[in-house]
Image (spheres, rainbow, N blue to C red):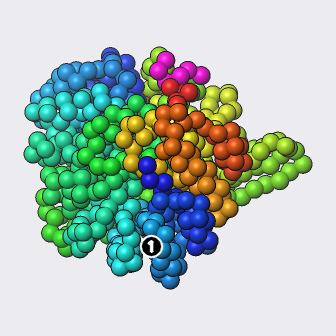
Amino acid sequence: MELVCPAGSLPAFKAALNAGANAIYVGFKDDTNARHFTGLNFNDRQAQKALALARDSGVKLYVAINTYPQPTGWSRWQAAVDRAVELGADALIIADMGLMTYVKEKYPQQNIHLSVQGSSTNAASLKFYKEEFDIKRAVLPRVLATKQVEQLCEKSPVDLEVFGFGSLCIMVEGRCVLSSYITGESPNTCGVCSPAKHVRWEESANSRRSRLNNVLIDEYQHKENASYPTLCKGRFKVDENTYHALEQPTSLSTLEIIPQLARMGIKAIKIEGRQRSPAYVEQVVRVWREALDAFKQNGERFSVSPQWLEQLDKVSEGQQTSLGPYSRPWQ
Amino acid sequence: MKIALGPILYYWTRQKVFDFYDSFKKSELPIVYMGETVCSKRKELHLHDWLDIAESMAAQGKEVVLSSLALISARSELQSLKKICANNRFLVEANDMAAVQLLTELNLPFICGSGINIYNAHSLALMHKKGMKRWVLPVELGAEALRGILQDAEKMGISDNLETEVFCYGKLPLAHSARCFTSRAKNRPKDKCELACIDYPEGLLLRSQEEQQLFTINGIQTQSAACYNLLSEWRHMAALGVDVMRLSPQAENMRAVVERFHKVINGSNEEILLLDESMLEPSCNGYWFAKPGMMAHEPAC
């Protein structure tokens, strides 16, 4: 299985490269990708540098252009496609069908991967993208159970990529606008969820409060670990109960099901986190490289090393990891 | 400008559903969408029940559209979708690309619901080429985005036989998940949800710890807590080229809401009030004005 790793900067790119990535995905410095954060991503010069490094080590470079262009921004998205093709990207990761139409018409030879933001969760939908755009691969939303992934692998007309590690979206990607409901900006329109510019922390004698566009997302007592106020991960009230009404701040970690994923026919594993530091990327990619190599060597005798877990736990959101949709304790 | 009744997004008893549609048989409502769009476990009505209601509404001269599920991940869900698409009688609203694919394979015309991501005229043109007759603007887009999309569509020459619909009233569908937040609220695993949604005909309110009403939990769907209401914008919409205003069923007073919209649009009502007794409170309209959706924006006159 191909290990697809994130890079939000050239140092992160180098870290992923050194730690053993098979492919690295990046975005340009604008809202054409779903990690449109201040100080993040690549200008043309940096992208060229990244490509040269990738070519030297036989690693693939993918460019994510995976937000949804609106009329006023169309030329910017078009330009992003032009730049990525000119650069020589091995694949473009796209969500919008209008943009895919453009790629197919202008660059029929260009590889397209359907972004997780494209929200494809079944064989009929994948067939649409295959027939219409000849996509080579689709990244599956983080909502499918292991058995559903397995069934999809049997029926899918394209290669499938799943998320292996990182932040966990509990809503179907590409179809969640909670963020724009509260802040005006969403992953689809602006490439951000619960954007940092709307975040405010309030400290008081007894507690710490996190707000998103003034809406109280959570309140922490002293010594409680505070998390970034992603709005689906806050503590809210339903009836008289105050709890994580939508989701606990956990992150996804699927090391233990590597053999299963391989057996099903999953072709690539994606590490989430273009917004993360080079040190994070280095750490996570290194562990996953070791794990995938160990699997290659030992096959079904593969077992998860405690050291890997320890290293991953150190960097996980909420200091807690889960198998996410693959184990479904909530099912 | 036409009014459409959207599909019921909540889980109501069989009787309540039949009564609900009965109450609209004699109304002036021209378009009715119906069917389960949220959760495949909701089985108070089967496809043949929906088809019966659909026939009876069609007999009253209404255009009936069968709405389909928004998140399709299980094999059984795909099978049910196939049956809906092959119903041989009524138009189908696609809420997942699976439906678009299946309807295209059957060479049938279709409608794209707000869950199909059409953010620009290029996507619109592709769906139109595939057989789309009408589309619903994604809920997070507003007037300016719509103006741009329709202007581009006109330049591409596809606007003549394509209708545009906007979600204009009701709690906004904001997200879908594989997880069920109603069963989570009841401390039940999803497989043993005991169809808890049936106890919440208008969903379950989610508030911040400061009592701010934020969202409405509706099974695997998360909606806004506030009721979206664009009645006051209807003229602007008509000028932009909107053909249909969608009103999303709420458990109470829906007849009055439909009548209110109908009267205003047909000019027999003097004043348009955002605050209206028959309408759900609080209301919001931010998305239409390119603001956070939860905001209640007073348009500059």
Residue B267 in view here: no
Q: Is residue B208 left or right of residue A142?
A: right
Q: Residue at the front extreme? A: A297
Badge 1 crowding class, 10 Å Cα cut-off, few under 14, some 14 to 19, many 20 or more, is few
- Frontmost residue, B82 versus B131: B82
Segment colored magenta: B187-192
Residue drawn at x 22%, y 69% is A108
Q: Residue at the bottom extreme? A: A45
Q: Position of residue A88 (x, y in %)?
A: 37, 75
Is B129 in the magenta?
A: no
- Frontmost residue, B65 versus B274: B65
Residue drawn at x 37%, y 18% is B13
Q: Is residue A179 left or right of residue B45?
A: right
Query: Which residue, given by chain and number where applicable, does mark 1 sit on?
Result: A55
Residue drawn at x 9%, y 45% is B107
Residue A262 in view here: yes
Residue drawn at x 39%, y 56% is A115
- Frontmost residue, B131 versus B19: B131
Q: Is residue A147 left or right of residue B183?
A: left
Q: Position of residue A274 (x, y in %)?
A: 56, 61
Q: Is residue A18 above or below residue B180?
A: below
- Frontmost residue, A236 versus A75: A75
Q: Quadrant of residue A9?
A: bottom right
The chain letter for the residue carrying disc 1 is A
Q: Is residue B222 above or below residue B195?
A: below
Q: Is residue B204 above or below residue A274?
A: above
